[in-house]
Image (tube, helix red, strand yellow):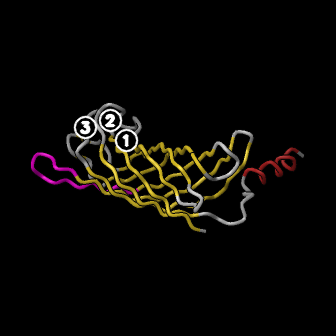
């Protein structure tokens, strides 16, 4: 009897009220950060360019605003001149992302959070020596969605092994992103 009563709850959790799936292609550019936040050493001279694809799975208007759940796949390329040698770092990410709009509609200001997995092609980048190539990926973003559906955002990204191995140096970068929205 209890299983039957849980079915409507599960249907509400995994069903989207939105009729059409929303998608975004995201172009980003940025630079590495110093050791002021999470990472232990600076990569502030690193330059970053990236592209992502996002797919909105579900959205829910609530009393606290509009909540959207996205899936995101990303590729980022970082370059750094370190001790007279150019180093390149390629990052491949896959992560779920939560986006929150304070109103019950997807426009204007929003906040975003994503956490997932990443694969980095180098363990050493600048003065930072990672313990593993597979890492956790974390980002926080704030942005603004225009009336056209396109989005401009500022993002902080962090990569590390999340203390699954020691040491856990990690590294960070900030980027400005333009999201091209389509359905």
Whether pointer 2 and pointer 3 mark residues with C-beta atoms closer than 8 Å, the reply is: yes
Write the start and end of the magenta stretch as one range: 80-92
Label 2, secondary structure: give it: loop
Magenta stretch, overall SS: strand
The spot of residue 42 in percent (x, y) is 25, 37
Q: On the image, numbered disc 1 is attached to which residue?
A: 160
Check the image and name the residue furthest to the front. Answer: 147
Q: Is residue 164 magenta?
A: no
Image position of 144 (left or right of 7): left
Distance between the Cα atoms at labels 1 and 3? Answer: 14 Å
In this view, the residue in front, 158 or 173, is: 173
Q: Marks 1 and 2: CB-CB under 8 Å?
A: yes
In the rendered image, residue 179, in percent from the top left (x then y), is placed at: 49, 59
Name the residue that disc number 3 marks. 42
Residue 39, numbered circle: 2
Indicate left or right for 143 with 108 as reference.
left
């Amino acid at each position: 009897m209890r299983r039957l009563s849980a079915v409507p709850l599960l249907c509400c959790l995994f069903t989207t009220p939105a009729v059409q799936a929303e998608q975004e292609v995201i172009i980003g550019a940025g630079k590495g950060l110093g050791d002021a936040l999470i990472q232990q050493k600076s990569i502030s001279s690193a330059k970053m360019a990236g592209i992502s694809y996002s797919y909105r799975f579900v959205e829910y208007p609530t009393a606290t605003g509009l909540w959207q759940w996205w899936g995101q796949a990303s590729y980022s390329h970082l370059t750094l001149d370190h001790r007279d040698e150019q180093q390149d770092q390629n990052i491949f990410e896959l992560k779920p992302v939560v986006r929150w709009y304070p109103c019950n509609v997807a426009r204007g200001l929003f906040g975003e959070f994503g956490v997932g997995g990443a694969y980095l092609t180098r363990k050493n980048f600048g003065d930072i020596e990672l313990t593993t190539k597979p890492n956790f990926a974390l980002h926080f973003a704030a942005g603004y969605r225009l009336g056209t559906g396109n989005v401009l955002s500022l993002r902080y990204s962090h990569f590390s092994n999340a203390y699954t191995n020691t040491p856990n140096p990690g590294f960070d970068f900030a980027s400005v992103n333009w999201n091209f929205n389509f359905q």
